[in-house]
């Protein structure tokens, strides 16, 4: 109690030499340059850098007056108050209760961590821990004391009345205006914002506003629901002036042993434009989700479900998985959606998974009835230590079912050994051996697979290339596939004071029976085989089991690295394959299968941290022409960065009869200053001479707000879809945790 004040004076005071009583719970510790009373029973006055503390509460002011009759403490001049929660408040004049808990302040101000500012003409602190502010304003922006932006932050919320609820960590505004650079733009009778220190709180998120020639004007206004510490939901309806209202949202749940993400939406179209890309139902929708759960005994459950109502949905509404789900889409087939349910177990001794797959094609020229569904796929491998290496014993089962087209069942078992030996002189030897057996059973084999049904005119031509010439409806095939191989490599190094060189020749010999089984087996799981510098030294270059590399062959190549000083580094590799006799296991345009394959390689150049050149190539062994060339040039000079991607592929596309695909993508970004950034991207089809996509973006940001403007031109090559131009404006409020 103030009746038993403890004085600690930094200036000389005349006091009676009586022992002060011990400090009690509500005592106030006071220090000042001067402390006095106007009369014996009058007010106690402290002046000059006055500091008062009671428990965890603290007051600092130029002058403090205590009135024993009323029990009030009045602090004047440069008043600073810290409450028991560590919150700082400021004011010109503050009247407090004797325990410094409650009070009234004039010219009130408060700092809300990490960077919020709350001010008011007056404030009242209630006993319930709530502060009531009159003529208040709140911002997360820096407030300048002078200049054109003096007292005019980028944005601030002004209100007639504000309740600061410290217990629930919210600010409630009554009769509020949102001001941008001092100009009131939006009025609301009520608004609620979380305290800036709150990690997660429910509330409205910044809107997105845009326009598209395909969809019209579009506005998205998200609302975030913080359901609990481990789950939330974002409801983000998007209204299209030409298409209607798309109701969509995202639900997330994350616990100690599971996580779930669902992104879904539904719309009832209101415009004939929705008929692009097919004849959809009156209700269109999308669903993207991922679920993971840890089970006992190191098992894990995974469930990914991705689907849309029709093929044209994603293009029309510009819908795709976002955030964490964006990486789940298969980069090899972005025009197909895959759903799966999987149980898997991985240990140091074994690997097991049981999975069912459902696929949805988004290609307008493909028939969903001919899309295979893997129900199920079962795989198991067990590992054993062996002299010099490791033995793997395992097998798999796969069933592929179609509504129309071939159905297949495959069972496979294998025994594999792989070992590595390093000599003291640096030679590396590797031994490889595998014994594998496969059994296939086919039904409705004469109906073929998807490529044979892209158009009626292709069917009879395609059928000639099917196993058994497309003449048999049902048949079974078994095969025994032994393979042995050995590999040698030897790195040679020369290290100088400023330069160093490393050259490593590498030779691999592989022996397998000479039979590809191409005339007996459908290639379902290895359609995306790519012969390049990465697959050159694979004992079996297939990505799956259906395609098998047969015959006797030698894979040879040489790689090198040169560090030439001043940050210049060159890495290179080139190699090819030699076969005892030609194989028909691979397509003609694949660059492999002849007695001598195409040359594959890579050249990478680094010049410090500012310039990177990565090149991957395949050169025709007969003509010396590039059959495939991928180049990436990346550069950064100060605030300017740029990237160039070039792709050139020569292939015979059965569906389009196209010989050459050649693409160029150029992108650049310039950080003009700490607030302004500009970026642009241009994608060009060099074969047709047309621009496929153009993007331009500008972002203006400081610590409290950001405005982004993005323009995109999409010159779609998909049948039924016209060119689309889009502009999107987004305003972000920054500073909240």
Image (tube, rainbow, N blue to C red):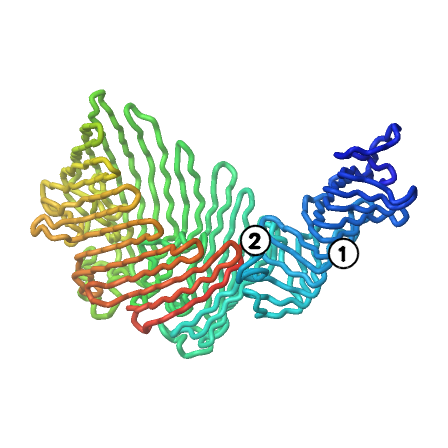
In the shown orientation, is residue 500 left or right of residue 288? left
Residue depicted at x 51% and y 51%: 260
Q: Give the percent coordinates (x, y) of residue 215.
A: 42, 73
Residue depicted at x 63% and y 59%: 138
Residue at the outermost right position? 41
Q: Are marks 2 and 1 in contact (CB under 8 Å)?
A: no
Q: Give the percent coordinates (x, y) of residue 185.
A: 57, 70
In the shown orientation, is residue 302 left or right of residue 278? right
Q: Secondary structure at mark 2?
A: loop
Of residue 699 and residue 370, the one placed in the foreground of this image is: 699
Q: Is residue 304 visible?
A: no
Q: Which mark is residue 214?
A: none
Q: Secondary structure at mark 1?
A: strand
Of residue 506 and residue 700, the one placed in the foreground of this image is: 700
Of residue 416 and residue 204, the one placed in the foreground of this image is: 204
Residue depicted at x 51% and y 41%: 295
What is the C-alpha distance between the residues marked 2 and 1?
25 Å
Q: Earlier in the sequence, mark 2 or mark 1?
A: 1
Residue depicted at x 29% and y 34%: 415
102, above or below 215, in the image: above
Q: Residues within 10 Å of mark 2 (few under 14, many from 20)?
A: some
Numbered label tally: 2
Which circle, 2 or 1, is nearer the viewer? 1
Q: Which mark is residue 736?
A: 2
311, above or below 105, in the image: below
Of residue 277 and residue 91, the one placed in the foreground of this image is: 91
Q: Which mark is residue 124?
A: 1
Image quarter where the N terminus lies is: top right
574, above or below 119, in the image: above
In the shown orientation, is residue 477 left or right of residue 8? left
Q: Give the percent coordinates (x, y) of residue 177.
A: 62, 67
């Amino acid at each position: 109690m103030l009746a038993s004040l403890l004085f600690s004076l930094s200036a000389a005071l005349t006091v009676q030499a009586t022992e002060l009583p011990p400090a009690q719970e509500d005592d106030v510790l006071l220090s000042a340059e001067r402390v006095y009373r106007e009369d014996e029973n009058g007010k106690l006055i402290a002046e000059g850098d006055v500091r008062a503390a009671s428990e965890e509460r603290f007051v600092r002011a130029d002058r403090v007056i205590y009135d024993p009759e009323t029990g009030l403490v009045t602090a004047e001049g440069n008043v600073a108050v810290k409450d028991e929660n560590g919150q700082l408040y400021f004011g010109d004049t503050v009247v407090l209760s004797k325990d410094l808990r409650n009070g009234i302040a004039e010219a009130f101000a408060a700092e809300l961590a990490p960077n919020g500012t709350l001010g008011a003409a007056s404030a009242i602190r209630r006993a319930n821990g709530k502060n009531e502010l009159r003529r208040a304003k709140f911002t997360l922006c820096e407030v300048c004391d002078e200049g054109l932006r003096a007292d005019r932050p980028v944005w601030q919320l002004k209100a007639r009345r504000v309740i600061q609820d410290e217990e629930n960590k919210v600010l409630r505004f009554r009769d509020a205006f949102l001001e941008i650079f001092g100009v009131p733009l939006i009025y609301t009778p009520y608004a609620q914002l979380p305290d800036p220190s709150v990690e997660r709180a429910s509330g409205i998120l910044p809107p997105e506003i845009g326009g598209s020639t395909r969809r019209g004007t579009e506005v998205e206004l998200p609302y975030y629901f913080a359901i609990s510490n481990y789950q939330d939901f974002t409801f983000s309806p998007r209204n299209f002036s030409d298409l209607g209202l798309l109701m969509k949202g995202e639900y997330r749940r994350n616990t100690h042993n599971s996580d779930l993400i669902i992104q879904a939406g539904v719309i009832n179209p209101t415009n004939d434009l929705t008929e692009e890309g097919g004849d959809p139902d009156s209700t269109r929708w999308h669903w993207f989700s991922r679920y993971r759960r840890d089970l006992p005994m190191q098992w894990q459950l995974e469930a990914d479900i991705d689907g849309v109502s029709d093929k044209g949905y994603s293009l029309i509404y510009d819908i795709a998985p976002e955030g964490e789900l964006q990486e789940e889409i298969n980069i090899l087939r972005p025009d197909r959606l895959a759903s799966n349910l999987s149980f898997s177990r991985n240990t140091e001794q074994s690997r097991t998974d049981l999975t069912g797959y459902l696929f949805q094609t988004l290609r307008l020229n493909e028939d969903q009835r001919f899309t295979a569904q893997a129900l199920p796929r079962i795989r198991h491998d067990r590992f054993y230590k062996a002299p010099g290496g490791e033995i793997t014993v395992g097998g798999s089962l796969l069933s592929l079912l179609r509504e129309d087209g071939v159905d297949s069942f495959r069972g496979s078992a294998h025994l594999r050994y792989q070992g590595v030996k390093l000599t003291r002189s640096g030679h590396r030897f590797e031994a490889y051996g595998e014994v594998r057996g496969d059994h296939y059973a086919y039904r409705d084999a004469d109906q073929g697979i998807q490529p044979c049904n892209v158009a009626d005119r292709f069917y009879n031509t395609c059928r000639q290339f099917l196993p058994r010439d497309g003449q048999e409806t049902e048949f079974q095939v078994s095969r025994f596939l032994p393979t042995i191989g050995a590999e040698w490599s030897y790195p040679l190094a020369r290290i100088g004071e400023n330069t160093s060189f490393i050259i490593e020749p590498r030779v691999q010999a592989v022996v397998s029976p000479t039979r590809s089984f191409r005339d007996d087996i459908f290639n379902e799981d290895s359609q995306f085989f790519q012969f390049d510098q990465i697959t050159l030294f694979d004992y079996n270059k297939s990505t799956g089991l259906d395609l098998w590399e047969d015959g006797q062959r030698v894979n040879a190549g040489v790689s090198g690295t040169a560090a030439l000083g001043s940050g210049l580094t060159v890495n290179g590799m080139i190699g090819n394959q030699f076969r005892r006799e030609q194989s028909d296991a691979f397509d003609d345009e694949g660059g492999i299968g002849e007695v001598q394959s195409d040359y594959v390689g890579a050249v990478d150049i680094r010049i410090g941290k500012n310039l990177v050149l990565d090149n991957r190539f395949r050169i025709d062994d007969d003509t010396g022409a590039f059959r495939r060339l991928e180049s990436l040039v990346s550069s950064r000079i100060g605030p300017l960065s740029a990237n160039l991607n070039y792709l050139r592929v020569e292939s015979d596309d059965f569906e389009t009869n196209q010989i050459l695909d050649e693409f160029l993508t150029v992108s650049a970004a310039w950080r003009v200053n700490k607030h302004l950034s500009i970026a642009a991207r241009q994608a060009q089809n060099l074969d047709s001479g047309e621009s496929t996509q153009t993007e331009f973006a500008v972002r203006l940001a400081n610590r409290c707000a950001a405005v982004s403007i993005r323009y995109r031109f999409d010159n779609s090559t998909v049948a039924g879809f016209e060119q689309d131009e889009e502009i999107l404006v987004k305003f972000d409020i920054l500073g909240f945790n």
